[in-house]
């Protein structure tokens, strides 16, 4: 069976998410981390384009919980907060209220797991060689080792 990787840990006191250590380690190893660890996932969730990479652009919300996060030993810059407005484009709707979108996407993120195989597939897609023809064979060897574990 292909191993499932949990993407987020939910922090109820902050109504926010943190990327799990396991996913963070794999994302770093596989080159899936861009300017944040879940940019590529957001693109798939939100119309499969660069609009989706901004699904967690929520600096205002992070500022609101910064003090409490610090008291908990967390850096608010590393937290992900669901902003219901990011999940509507107002072109034909919205069909749901902000509250409904917020609870739905919070539940989705709480339960989000991706298979190691999926992570590896996307790693190959997002890591084209950049002047280093040995990069992809190296990445493929790393992936094969991960899949055998």
Image (spheres, rainbow, N blue to C red):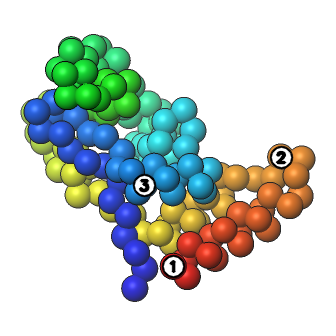
* Residue that mark 1 sits on: 149
**Which residue: 37% across, 31% down?**
78
Q: Residue furthest bottom?
A: 1
* Residue that mark 2 sits on: 130
Left or right of residue 121, residue 2 in this image? left
Judged from the image, the secondary structure of the residue bearing numbered disc 2 is: loop
Q: CA distance from mark 2 to mark 1?
A: 28 Å
Judged from the image, the secondary structure of the residue bearing numbered disc 1 is: loop
Badge 1: few (under 14), some or many (20 or more) residues near its Cα, within 10 Å?
few
First-in-chain label (2 vs 1): 2
Percent of width and height locating residue 140:
71, 70
Dots 1, 3 in contact, CB < 8 A: no
Mark toward the viewer: 2 or 1: 1
Q: CA distance from mark 2 to mark 3?
A: 24 Å
* Residue that mark 3 sits on: 23
Residue 61 seen in the figure: no
Position of residue 137 relative to residue 85, above or below, is below
Badge 3: few (under 14), some or many (20 or more) residues near its Cα, within 10 Å?
many
Residue 24 seen in the figure: yes
Left or right of residue 49, residue 55 in this image? left
**Which residue: 40% across, 75% down?**
3
Q: Quadrant of residue 74?
A: top left
**Which residue: 55% across, 44% down?**
33
Position of residue 66 relative to residue 54, above or below, is above
Position of residue 123 relative to residue 84, above or below, is below
**Which residue: 44% across, 38% down?**
52
Q: Quadrant of residue 62?
A: top left
């Amino acid at each position: 069976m292909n191993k499932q990787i949990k993407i987020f840990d939910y922090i109820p006191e902050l109504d926010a998410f943190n990327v799990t250590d396991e996913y963070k380690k794999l994302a770093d190893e596989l080159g899936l981390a861009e300017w944040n660890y879940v940019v590529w996932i957001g693109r798939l969730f939100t119309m499969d384009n660069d609009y989706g990479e901004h699904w967690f652009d929520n600096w205002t919300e992070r500022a609101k919980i910064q003090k409490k996060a610090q008291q908990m030993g967390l850096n608010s810059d590393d937290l992900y907060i669901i902003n219901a407005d990011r999940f509507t484009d107002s072109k034909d709707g919205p069909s749901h209220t902000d509250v409904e979108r917020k609870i739905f996407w919070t539940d989705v993120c709480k339960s989000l797991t991706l298979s190691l195989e999926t992570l590896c597939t996307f790693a190959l897609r997002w890591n084209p060689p950049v002047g280093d023809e040995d990069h992809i064979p190296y990445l493929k060897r790393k992936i094969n080792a991960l899949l055998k574990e």
